[in-house]
Amino acid sequence: MQDQDDVFDQPLTRQPTILSVYNQKGGVGKTTTAVNLAYLLAKAGMRVLLIDADAQANATMHLGVDAYALDRDGATLYHVLLKDRPIEKTTVSVCGGLFDLLPSSLTLSQADGEMAGDPNSNLALREKLGDIEGAYDAIVVDCPPNLGQVTINALNCSDYVLVPVQTEPMAALGVPMLIDNTLTKVRRRVNPGIEVLGILPTMYADRHSMDRLTLAQLHELYGVRTRIFAPVPSSTQYPQGSAAGRPTLEAIPGAPGAQSYQEVADAVIALRAKRQEVRHV
């Protein structure tokens, strides 16, 4: 019989911290946030996987990866979810090997329809990630701007959700539906542990009165129950980083909003450290 002290001395499998970056409205800086957050977490020494779960493949192309070639080779998230391709044979090393990417392609747009007929399909991504348990410290999922099967898969396996919100009135309207409706259902039905990491205001222009008003409303409505990160200013430097095939904060470390993204990364790192301490008690 194994001694009890020996059991506790054995190393625990390192569970990844999984964060979905999600808003049902597009054009809010979701992909920019996911790419730069993955970069900052990896730069801090974490083993990071970025999952491009959007059929537009913006994160894939942002990092200079040829989504069309990978689609022809059957090596994208679609093929992992629906063709039983192993994740470890599908990931691509990016940023000079700093972190890994699970790429997307336009073919992923077929996934929602193909998965709809399978009652267990909402757990497909969780099952696939179980095959690489211990390989990563953090997994960041760039979700599509809709609540289809792929998004549900991401939320069902996530520990946290980060909500980028453009600071304009129409962009903020979807926040109550996400926090009060969608996540409540996810907790009740499948994933009781999912939490909102916070709201990240994006494309903020302090000189615009409507931006200031929207930011104030976000603090008033949600500041008591969830964290509101410092806003990311509107800047042309983020599209420039995307065009260069690199995270903007790798190419331009002092870009406007760098401190905001670092604040998010620090929050993820702190929460992971806290969970690791609890598991080892």
Image: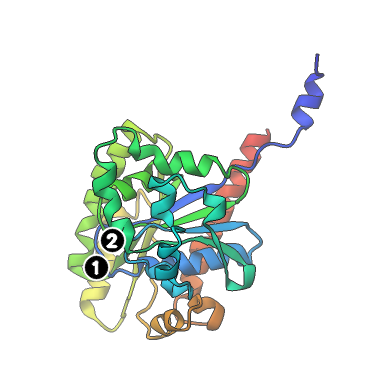
Query: Is there any visible trace of residue 37 in the rendered image?
Result: yes
What number of labels is visible? 2
| Residue closest to the eye, 280 or 224 | 280
Where is residue 273? Give x, y as percent.
Answer: 62, 48
Type of the residue with mark 2: Leu
Q: Position of residue 21 (x, y in %)?
A: 39, 57
Task: Provide residue 128's location: percent of width, then percent of height.
Answer: 48, 43
**94 lies above or below 238:** above
Relative to 28, is 136 on the left or the right? right
Determine which residue is flagged by label 1.
Answer: 214
Looking at the rendered structure, the secondary structure element under dot 1 is helix
Quadrant of the rendered structure where residue 62 is? bottom left
Q: Can residue 253 be seen in this view?
A: no
Residue located 47% across and 67% down the image: 35
Report the residue at 32% width, 38% height from top: 186
CB atoms of marks 2 and 1 within 8 Å: yes
- Location of mark 2 (residue): 218
Residue 41 rendering spot, x and y as whole percentages: 57, 62
Quarter of the image that includes the C terminus? top right
Which secondary structure, mark 2?
helix
Extreme-front residue of the structure:
72
Disc 2 residue crowd, few under 14, some 14–19, many 20+, Cα 10 Å? some
Amino acid bearing label 1: Thr
Residue 219 position by quadrant: bottom left
